[in-house]
Amino acid sequence: MAALPLNFSIEQGTARSTMKFVQIPAPDFDLAMTLKSGQVFHWEKIDNGFCGTIGDRAVHVEQVGKVIKVRGGETPQPARETRALRNIIADYFALDHPLSEICASFPNDPTMNAARDFCRGLRIIRQPKWECLATFICSSVKQVAHIRQISRALRKRFGDARKIDHYTVYTFPSPAQLAKSSEKELRECALGYRAPNLLATARLVHSRAADLDALAALPDVDLREKLCELPGVGAKVANCVMLFAYERLRAFPIDVWIERVLKEKYFRRRRKVTGQRLRAFSETYFGKHGGYAQQYLFHHARMNKTHAYGGRRAVGRQQEGHESACPSR
């Protein structure tokens, strides 16, 4: 038997979930590409689909053509859970986003066209606010594989176990669960210098000194500014959280990958381009769906790194949260 991922375990003799698959129409969607595109880090390929959690629910989801088949964990009220799960999945994977219209709004240039064609069906996931914020605080100067390892360690040590079929998955720990931890415990989850930032932010969110739900009412500039006040959050992390948790589809995170793409493909004849110039360019050039354009450019570059691109997925070469200011884009 192949080794299981760190956040899964087999319990021999456990019966399969009694809940049947719920089928959800999902045209214009690629489940595998969406989950592997570097916006979320805990889903694991199991059998014909993926297992993970959405909030506090264990979920197994797979795709057959233009249909998503999804099953939750054991529940005493399967009919009610079926209705809830259908809505949760459709919302989480943003199946209501008019993807063809979004892609049609992208700039018409060779780089963007190649990324759009390569990433057909990739959608921006609507992530839980705290989970997204905490995960991207942990992502600074980290490759995707390393971010996944940190997420697994945090979930297994501090999260809650949930059963799905004969697997046990773990929820992402709440602010309260992490607020009770120590910097030493977090460092044991491979967080390094990110540990005190995550701990401090967890305590602010748990105490309601930072109200993540209330921030949703703010316009983009103010939301970015408030996020940047949190320990461990700089401009790049803030834009990731705005895009993936607050559905601000104009937000355009500029990490190492995207910086290289912009410089090599859009500023090829300029020897030096400042970060401020890149932010201003991305805001105007890619428009109101810039976040989607960014994700397509990023995933295409990362999957084709042997061509014109180099580097690895990292939020930045600087330590997020150690920036002196959080400039608005």
Image (cartoon, rainbow, N blue to C red):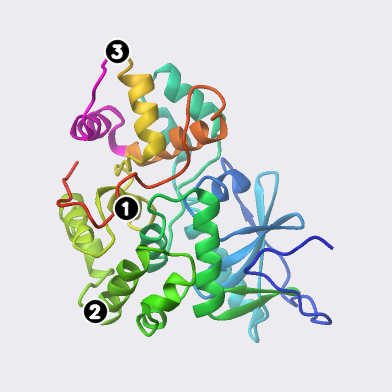
Q: CA distance from mark 3 to mark 1?
A: 29 Å
* Foreground: disc 3 or disc 1: 3
* Residue depicted at 28% across the width and 69% down the height: 213
Mark before the other along the chain sequence, 3 or 1 = 1
User: In this rendering, does residue 17 appear at all?
Assistant: yes
Residue 49 highlighted magenta (yes or no): no
> Relative to residue 137, is residue 280 drawn left or right?
left
Residue range in magenta is 269-288
Quadrant location of residue 69? bottom right
The amino acid sitting under disc 1 is Val
Secondary structure beneath disc 2?
Answer: loop
Q: CA distance from mark 1 to mark 2?
A: 20 Å
The amino acid sitting under disc 3 is Arg
Q: Nearer the viewer, residue 269 or 98?
A: 269
Residue annotated with mark 2: 208
Q: Is residue 38 above or below residue 292?
A: below
Residue annotated with mark 3: 269
Q: CA distance from mark 3 to mark 2?
A: 48 Å
> Residues at badges 1 and 2 in contact (C-beta under 8 Å)?
no
* Residue depicted at 59% across the width and 78% down the height: 80
Image spot of residue 199 (x, y percent) = 33, 74
Q: Which mark is residue 84?
A: none
Residue annotated with mark 1: 237
* Foreground: disc 3 or disc 2: 3
Image spot of residue 168 (x, y percent) = 67, 75
* Residue depicted at 42% across the width and 82% down the height: 177
Q: Is residue 18 above or below residue 328?
A: below
Quadrant location of residue 198? bottom left
